[in-house]
Image: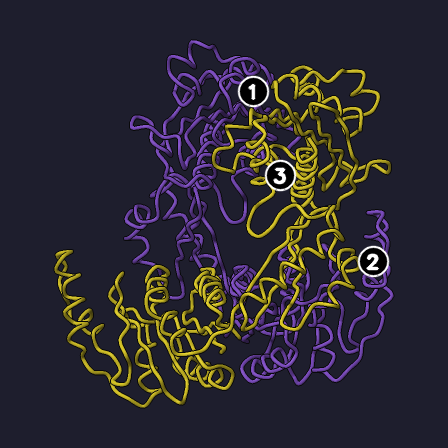
Chain colours: A purple, B yellow
């Protein structure tokens, strides 16, 4: 079974936004055993949309459409689909009430324009939008499936995960696809490839390895396609068992768990508490930790010290240490980690101090120099890293590296 | 004159890479007055590529193709174009010598596979590749222009800048295109649309308005196309002048500036300093502020207080206030903002306390309840917001809203 993704909206065609929706959809569909034959981006123009639908219909079984469902005048997808299927809009009172709830809860007036969002084509099945007010629509016409979803990424993602992909898998026979993702930190793509070259060359037929690098970490995705589910699962298990000892120093987890979820789970299991003292990361480590629901159980707080004064007066790093070694130094980052653990009365702490860039570097401490310290009930230690020139990437890499250092200590303790 | 972008390659269709090439091309073409009518991503499949070319030819004057020009077996664009134009490959000795130079310089063997890269279709004009070994090709057939370029971003970018865009502008008369983006915060899409309905209905011919919503803010993009640059610029200016007073409360900036850049610029101009005290945002406000290069000039730091104890003992909020009103209250958020400003010795502070979710809500304070306080040299005030159920979005919306509240105070002071 093949599908086509059609994205509607001038913002893609004038280059104002990058089409990340299609990449996400293509990846998820692929994982579900559904092949994407073509991705087409068209303008907010009725005739153009209808032509794209006609062309797609000749190629594929399923057409997934995103965008153009907002309440404003430039959004014409719903009216166009009505014309395309030669049908009319009718008010859906379930939708009407659901949207009304959202507006009432937020104490906003439910205007006529908003009410119009509950009008849907007669021939569609409504896909409820749990994250917004534009509903999705599922059509079965001309022997094909057409699905229309909002272009807002998290709204589309929720609909795909909860409704569209499960329903497609139910309706069409898809091959069995098995994936296992191994989460890697602390080694670059090419070095990793060298280390596992022999293992990779010996992969059995039907197995495929993908390197998915991100900032600060990397995912290895091993995929298998076939008919015999039991055999594939057995082979997959055997391959992972062979791979693990080769790169055990770099594996921090599997599949969709994030570094901050793993750290949180370990802290929770052990009933321990954490705080951070951040300079160059400016709160990003704390942000990642607190992005996990329930993190208030194990996270006490953080002190972000962007100046000498704050490092000294609030955190309690000695003036002499700061003056003698500078803020980006082993001595200061160790003092930050110890002081934070004492002040916040936690079992563990993370401290980071570095030169995020793009300016502020010296010959001795170029941009990308970062010191990270971890303090535990047993010891406090620091490590120096040399990252690159990009501020955003340096902040992310420092955060991931720091959380992984803490994770390794938590496993030992 | 309109063009279509066709990207060739399975990696986009399985979601392994995001198609940033098309976004870059669309933006540059648009700036050059060349409209992109459609973007189409197809697989490494001969018949599929030929169908895409046939369809594109019915829509546009110029077809820009990227990808599939490497030396390996999976790259079939050149052979496909040969068949499409019913022509043959012939060795181009200029290209042969240029590529040989590259291989000699890097002391690599010039293999038969690499030599084949100097074979080009008889009917094309070669576009020399200054950054790699795969040449670009310019065809004029069936009354249309077809351009084939490598998929490697910096190779394609160099060809577009040096050869393709200049030649297209020479060959075709292109209209003048003008864009102005207005950055909006504090009002939803539909309410904004209601407010500016009259203004929008009266837009002159050639002008088009797009609503581009994001989490916590929204962009309005006004685009104009025409022949007379001076007239368009004058009209654009007039329209913005008319629009501004209608929604002045909600405009925080223009074009590509971010909220944190604007706040940073204002603090810098006034020589003032800032700190934050964060509970539900867990460091995300500080992260946004410090994501701006040079923010250490005006940002002192932040205290992230995820527990009562830290709010009391480190920040200095009174125990009675916490116990009487609870952490998510006007009284506590005001005390947080005041205490932070005193402790960090800054001119301004932001404080936020709320229930980010997904759990932790009560009837009185449901998930999404957020209090934000701003403290300035003149006053300290707090506002209550009711956001939604999504943790990540609540954190983002709180941050954007808080930064905008501060921005408005900075403008007054």
Q: Is residue A274 visible?
A: no
Q: Decide which of A17, A385 is in the foreground and name it.
A: A17
**Co-location on one chain, circles 2 and 3:** yes
Q: Quadrant of residue A10?
A: bottom right
Q: Position of residue A317 (x, y in %)?
A: 49, 13
Along the horizontal axis of the image, is B87 left or right of A73? Answer: left
Label pair 2/3, CB-CB below 8 angstroms: no
The residue pinned by badge 2 equals A98
Of labels 2 and 3, the one closer to you: 2
The residue pinned by badge 1 equals A347
Q: Is residue B334 above or below residue B160?
A: above
Give the Cα separation between the discs numbered 1 and 2: 46 Å
> SS class of the residue under badge 2?
helix
Q: Position of residue A295 (x, y in %)?
A: 64, 33
Q: Decide which of B385, A181 is in the foreground and name it.
A: B385
Q: Decide which of B303, A335 is in the foreground and name it.
A: B303
């Amino acid at each position: 079974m093949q599908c086509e993704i059609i994205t509607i909206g001038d913002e893609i065609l004038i280059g104002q936004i990058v089409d990340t929706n299609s990449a996400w959809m293509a990846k998820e569909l692929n994982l579900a055993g559904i092949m994407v034959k073509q991705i087409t981006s068209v303008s907010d123009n009725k005739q153009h949309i209808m032509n794209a639908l006609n062309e797609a219909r000749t190629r594929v079984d399923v057409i997934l459409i995103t965008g153009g469902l907002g309440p404003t005048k430039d959004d014409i997808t719903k009216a166009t689909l009505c014309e395309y299927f030669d049908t009319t809009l009718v008010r859906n009172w379930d939708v009407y009430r659901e949207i009304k709830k959202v507006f009432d809860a937020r104490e906003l007036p439910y205007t006529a324009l908003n009410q119009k969002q509950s009008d849907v084509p007669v021939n569609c099945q409504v896909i409820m939008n749990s994250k917004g007010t534009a509903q999705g629509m599922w059509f079965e016409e001309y022997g094909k499936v057409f699905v229309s979803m909002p272009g807002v990424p998290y709204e589309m993602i929720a609909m795909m995960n909860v409704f569209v992909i499960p329903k497609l898998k139910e309706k069409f026979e898809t091959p069995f696809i098995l994936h296992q993702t191994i989460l890697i930190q602390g080694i670059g793509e090419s070095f990793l490839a060298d280390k596992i070259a022999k293992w990779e060359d010996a992969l059995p037929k039907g197995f495929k390895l993908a390197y998915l690098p991100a900032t600060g970490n990397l995912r290895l995705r091993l995929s298998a396609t076939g008919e015999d589910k039991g055999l594939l699962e057995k082979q997959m298990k055997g391959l992972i068992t062979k791979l693990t000892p080769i790169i055990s120093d770099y594996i921090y987890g599997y599949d969709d768990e994030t570094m901050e979820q793993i750290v949180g789970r370990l802290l929770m299991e052990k009933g321990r508490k954490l705080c951070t003292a951040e300079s160059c990361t400016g709160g990003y480590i704390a942000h990642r930790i607190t992005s996990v629901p329930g993190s208030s159980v194990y996270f006490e707080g953080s002190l972000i010290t962007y100046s000498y004064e704050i490092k000294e007066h609030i955190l309690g790093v000695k003036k002499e240490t700061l003056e003698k070694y500078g803020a980006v130094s082993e001595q200061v980052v160790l003092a930050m980690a110890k002081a934070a653990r004492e002040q916040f009365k936690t079992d563990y702490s993370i401290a980071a101090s570095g030169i995020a860039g793009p300016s502020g570097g010296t010959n001795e401490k170029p941009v990308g120099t970062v010191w990270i310290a971890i303090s535990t009930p047993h010891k406090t230690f620091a490590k120096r890293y040399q990252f690159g020139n990009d501020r955003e990437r340096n902040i992310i890499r420092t955060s991931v590296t720091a959380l992984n250092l803490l994770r390794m200590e938590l496993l030992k303790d």
